[in-house]
Image: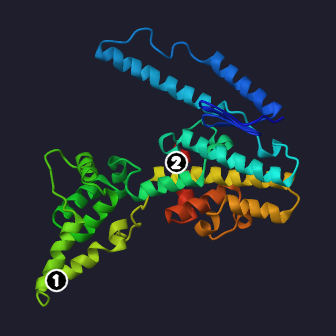
Amino acid sequence: MTRPAVRSGNLIECKRLHRAGWWLIPYTREAVSAMYRALETLGSTRRSTILPRTVPRKRSEIHREVKRLVPEIHKERIAFYNAQPCWSLREIQVNSSSEVHQAVEEFLGLAKIAAAEFCWAMNLPVSGMGWKIHGWKHTTFAEIENIIKDLNAGHWLPPELRADLIRSAAEAEALFHRASRNEPEAVARLDFLFPSKEDKLRAGQAILDTTQNPIVPAPEFLAADWVRTAIRHPDSNEAEEARDNLRRLVSKQAAKGSRPKGGRPASQHHEEIVSTIWMMSYCISKQMREIQKFLLKSEPDEKKRRAILDESYLWLYPVTGMDYVQFLEFGNTQSALELAGKLLGISASKVAKVVHSRQSRS
């Protein structure tokens, strides 16, 4: 069952697959029938009371209406996500090696568009959403890379959540005060967590008492002062202290948080980040496995199978140090832990601990 490629508004239909938003469905009778059943079910179960009959006017009425609507919208979101038809790439029928390659390219091309439509960064799955079942159809490594880039640039989490990485409210408050006294490690740590002046201001407002307003210096200005001192008075005690301060300011340990005596090292990433990258890594692992199973069914030539997978996942070896055979020897869960750990610069066991902790609380 195939169709010619057609583009119409938000619906893209290709020869073997079609996409509506971030839903991907193969042109098989089973999958298309499942899609229609899903849409009928969504239509029949949609609550008629989700929107108010009249717009509330009083503040108390608005508060009650918001409290009523939020759970309804939450349920609708979960229901819509889970209504996607379940299918496998192995259901797609091909007649030649060239069609095998075309089918994989078509799927990956549509998955790229679907991933952009879904937008993991703004649409993280919540408890009850079957992302382990459907996520492989709308996830790409490029989307993970974008989140990692935003994370490294300090644009991923709001400052209020990034403040959680300081360990406790008392330590966070002390860190701001130490930075205001030009202590190199404190200045470096705060600038790592809150790169912009606005971020520091928001974090300070969330952490400090409203009567406190310590001024946190920018590291580049401090460094410039210390460099001038070290150059202009090279033999002085002040110059020696300035050189020591510069070494402490640019220390990797200072930026990422030093190990407190007798305690654990500072957390490098918020658990929200670790969990998100693990979920996306899981979906990528499942996607690779789906393509591998499709190739085992449809392409008898092992060299061609390997070439298609290598071409489809060029990033795998540079990131993980493994080829797809080694990577897929792990199950989806362990593969995801390994990939997420490599991307975040932490151990797979650390990722597993964070994921388990979040799952046990949900």
Left or right? Give the position of 80 relative to 169: right
Q: Secondary structure at mark 2?
A: helix
* Figure check: 249 above or below 38: below
Question: Residue 143 in the image: x percent, y percent?
Answer: 54, 51
Viewer-nearest residue: 280 or 75? 280
Residue type marked 2 = Arg
Location of the N terminus by quadrant is top right
Viewer-nearest residue: 107 or 77? 107
* Figure check: 237 above or below 297: below
Question: Residue 46 in the image: x percent, y percent?
Answer: 59, 18
Q: Residue at x 60, y 61 (%)?
A: 339
**Residue position marked by numbered label 2 in the rendering:** 358
Quadrant of res 173: bottom left
Q: Which mark is residue 138?
A: none
**Residue position marked by numbered label 1 in the rendering:** 230
Left or right? Give the position of 278 relative to 38: left
Quadrant of res 241: bottom left
Which numbered disc flags the more N-terminal residue, 2 or 1?
1
Viewer-nearest residue: 214 or 1? 1
Q: CA distance from mark 2 to mark 1?
A: 48 Å
